[in-house]
Each structure stands twice: as C-alpha cells, then as structure tokens.
Amino acid sequence: MFTNTYSKLPEHFFQRVSPERFSDPRLICFNSQLAEEICKEANNFSQSDLAQIFSGQKILEGSEPLAMAYAGMQFGHMVPQLGDGRAQLLGEISGYDIQLKGSGRTKFSREGDGRSALGPVIREYLVSEAMHALGVPTTRALCAVTTGEKVYRQFGYEPGGIFTRVASSHLRVGTFQYFAIRDDLSGIKTLFNYTLDRHYPELKSLSNDRAKAINMVNNLIERQANLIAQWMSFGFIHGVMNTDNFSVGGITIDYGPCAFMDDFQFDKSFSSIDIRGRYSFDNQVPIAQWNILRFVESILPLIDTNQENAIKIIEKEIIPKLDLFEDKRDQIMARKLGITDYQNEDKKLTKLFLTYLENNKMDFTMAFRNLPLLFNGDDRLYKKSPDLETFLGLWKKRVRKLDDLNQINPIYIPRNHQVQRVIDGAYENQFEKFHEALSVFTQPFKEDPDLKDWSLPPKPEEQIKETFCGT
Ligand code: AMP
Ligand code: MG
C-alpha cells in the first residue's frame, strides 16, 4: 500500500522513527471519500483497524515512518533546526504523503512531548476540510483518533488525539533552509530535484539548474499568489506564516492558530503568539513575498555560484513577478463583488467596500453573501452610512455578474466560536457536533434554512479574540 520516496534520500534528511504505544486508540472520524480517491482498500478496514493504523500502532507494508528535518524563520528569526517534532511521515499513497500528527517524540521534539491534544486535531480536521470544500489548495484530513491518554498543556490536562494528514508533500521553504544554512550544496540539489519530481515535473526537461530554479520560483509565486488571494477572499488568517509553514508546492499547510474573521478588520490577527501582528490578515501578502525571497536565497547557488550574478538575475527575472501577489488579491476581491472584467481602478472599489465593513464592524462573510440582495435594493442587512452610498453608486456601474456569487461567496465557514463549541463537545466525549459541523463546512455554498445557526456570526459573549497553537 505504502511507498516512501523520502526515506530513499540521504539519511541526514530525516530520522527513522517508531510511533509511541498508546493505551486505547479510538476512531473519531475516517474520511472515506478521500480514501476512495487515494487508497480505496482502506475503506475495507474495520473501525478498530483504522484506529490502530492511524495511531501508528499497526504499521502497514511499505510504510517507513520518519521525521523530516527542516529549519525555519520563526517571526523573522532563523531557527537552524526545527523538524517534525510531533509529526511522523508514514509514507506515500498514490503520490500523497500520509503523516501522523501527535504520535510521539522524535529527535526534533526539543522540549515538546511529540503529542497532540484533541482540540488541535478537531480544529485541523474541520478547517482543512472546509478549505478544500471552498476550493483552496490544502493538506487534507484523512483520520482522527483519540489516544486514550492525557497530554499536559497551557490550561492543564487535555485528552490526547492523533490527526492523519494527507499532503501533496510536506516540503517547505524551511526544508531548503535546513541545507542552505549548513552550506550543504549537495543536500540543496538533492532536495531541489526531489521537489521537481513531486511538484514541478514539467520543469525537469529544462536544460540547466538555473532555468529550472527560476521557473520553479516563478511557478511557486503563481501558486502562492493564488493561494494567499483565496485565503484572503474567505477572510482566512493563517496566523503563523513562518518559512517552515510555507509550502514549496503552494498548498496551505499547518493549521495552528488559524482563524476565519467575523468582523472585518484589515490588520486583524488572532494568534496569541503574534503580538506584533506580523501575520495579520493584510500582512499575508507582504509576508508571502518575503517568504518567497527566503526560498530564493536558499537555492541561490543553483541560479549562479557567483552571488552577485545570481542577485542580478533574480532582480531581473523574479522580483518583478512578486507583484502578482497584490494583483491576484485585488482580482479575487473584485470577483467577489461580481466584477468579471477586472481593471486596475477596481481595487479602489474593493478597498472602499472593505473600509466600510471595517468602520461599521460588519461581518465579512455575510456582507459578501448578501450582495445580491443589496444590489436589488434590499439594504436591511447593511449599516447605513455615507460610505455605503458612495460604494453603491460606483459598484452598480461595475457589476457584471451576480448570479454565480453564491458559488463564490460562502455562507458557512468554520467560525472560531463554532469550532470551539465542537471542541468543547469533544472534550466531553460528544462527537455529534463534530460530524454535523463537518457536513456543514464541507457544503459551504449551499444554503439550508435548517442550518441557519451555523451561518451566524458570534454574539458578543461568544466572540473569541485569541487562538493558540495548542502544541
Ligand atoms: P508549528 O508551530 O506547529 O509549526 O511547530 C513548530 C515546531 O515545533 C515544529 O518543529 C514542530 O514539530 C514542533 N512542535 C510543535 N508541537 C510539538 C510537540 N507537542 N512536541 C514536539 N514538538 C512540537
Ligand atoms: Mg509547522
């Protein structure tokens, strides 16, 4: 069933590991639809088999569990060694990494216990599947189990869980930085070729490393620019866009303190560790650009061994492409307003609308969802303001298409207070709400009057202002 191509790379790329023993692993949820796409046989396993396999108690043929080495710039500061401290890669199925999160310590665990509390397991399951349903490239959720053990966290003992994540790869900018900071040119080349195989096979026929590297970066810029634009179009704040959480395949990876915004605010951030708002909503574009440059730095010798030459090439062939991040963001926001023939001027219009939302503390998701009503003269759901009048005057002239907006602007997103409610239930061993939430969030565009509660922003007393990594 499994292969493990990463385990064939040089030994200093990873550590071979064995998942820990857990007393009583039990299945919470198995994503049989995803299994149908990538590993049909898994749908024949019994519930207890699934609990054994996806807690690492039973290792299937071909799987060679390992922890990947990587570095990372955390909040702008280089940490030469991070690595999978609580994640263990079982191997690949159908070209996808299958990884356990919370299955025990590795040599990269530092002070950590290598485990995961149930809260982050539930959060990542719901949010990553919601993101997929919204059409955002992301890691997926294959399985969640409870371990039967407690883990100690900031607020005391919590039930333990293990999350199984599926990814087109777990290669990050930080993986490249691990070798770059050690001046390990052969490591960089090996990783680069491996990345071509996994994510950019069409570039392999190019004649030299320079061409491959420049094209890889420009492809990545395109993927990440689309990705960040999509995040922002749904009010998603990743929360910890360190280079070790920044995929070189262009997918969303690592759902720690992430959150969807309720009231719109340009500089909104939730993460308890993001005190200065480095990873706030609006900073996601400049931070992504910065992360791309850290990637370019780490593969610099592939562009030219002479640093000055390399920089000249980068200035000419890569830096101008970074504007794509702003362009994609502005285009997608305009599309949410029903503008299909984006023009440069339209970004002023989206800014006007967003500023109106910010000044009037309006809910981001509902404000977009109700636009067809607003267009047709029903403004009951919008706070009165001269800004709204100005916007309406300009917007009505620019709207091209309204009838597909309900497939673009979702009604159900995993709001913080709802996710928290599900987690609270799970901590009481109640998983009905989890399953209900999952079915709602994986149909984000289809309105169902019976599910009205799930579309509502939090009441003041329900508002969650801070999110935690939970590690
Ligand atoms: P993250 O904030 O989840 O991206 O994790 C940052 C680093 O901390 C990574 O190297 C993780 O593997 C490590 N880490 C996070 N939680 C734990 C834990 N419970 N035990 C060991 N290492 C951890
Ligand atoms: Mg991480």
Image (spheres, rainbow, N blue to C red):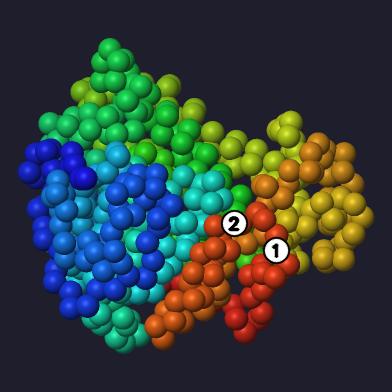
- Give the class, few, some or many, for how many residues have Cα within 10 Å of label 1's Cα (few <14, many ≥20): few
- Place of residue 225 in the rendered image (x, y in percent of width and height, measured from the top left): 50, 39
* Residue 300 seen in this snapshot: no
The residue type indicated by label 2 comes to Gln
Between disc 2 and disc 1, whose residue precedes? 2
Lateral position of residue 294 relative to residue 416, left or right: left
Residue 268 figure quarter: bottom right
Number of dots carrying numbers: 2
Name the residue tied to disc 1.
448
Q: Residue at x 31, y 81 (%)?
A: 159
Do callouts 2 and 1 mark residues in contact (Cβ within 8 Å)?
yes
Residue at far right of view: 377
The quadrant of the rendering that contains the N terminus is top left
User: In this picture, is 460 found above or below 178?
Assistant: below
Taking depth in this image into account, of 144 and 291 the one nearest to the observer is 144
The residue type indicated by label 1 comes to Asp
Q: Residue at x 22, y 66 (%)?
A: 52
Q: Residue at x 47, y 63 (%)?
A: 126
Q: Disc 2 beta carbon < 8 A from ligand 1? A: no
Q: CA distance from mark 2 to mark 1?
A: 10 Å
Q: Residue at x 54, y 46 (%)?
A: 135
Which numbered circle lies on residue 248? none
- Give the class, few, some or many, for how many residues have Cα within 10 Å of label 2's Cα (few <14, many ≥20): some
- Place of residue 147 in the rendered image (x, y in percent of width and height, measured from the top left): 25, 75
Taking depth in this image into account, of 16 and 207 the one nearest to the observer is 16
Residue at far top of view: 207
Residue at far left of view: 11
Which numbered circle lies on residue 443? 2
- Place of residue 46 in the rendered image (x, y in percent of width and height, measured from the top left): 29, 64
Q: Helix or strand or loop: what does disc 1 sit on? A: loop
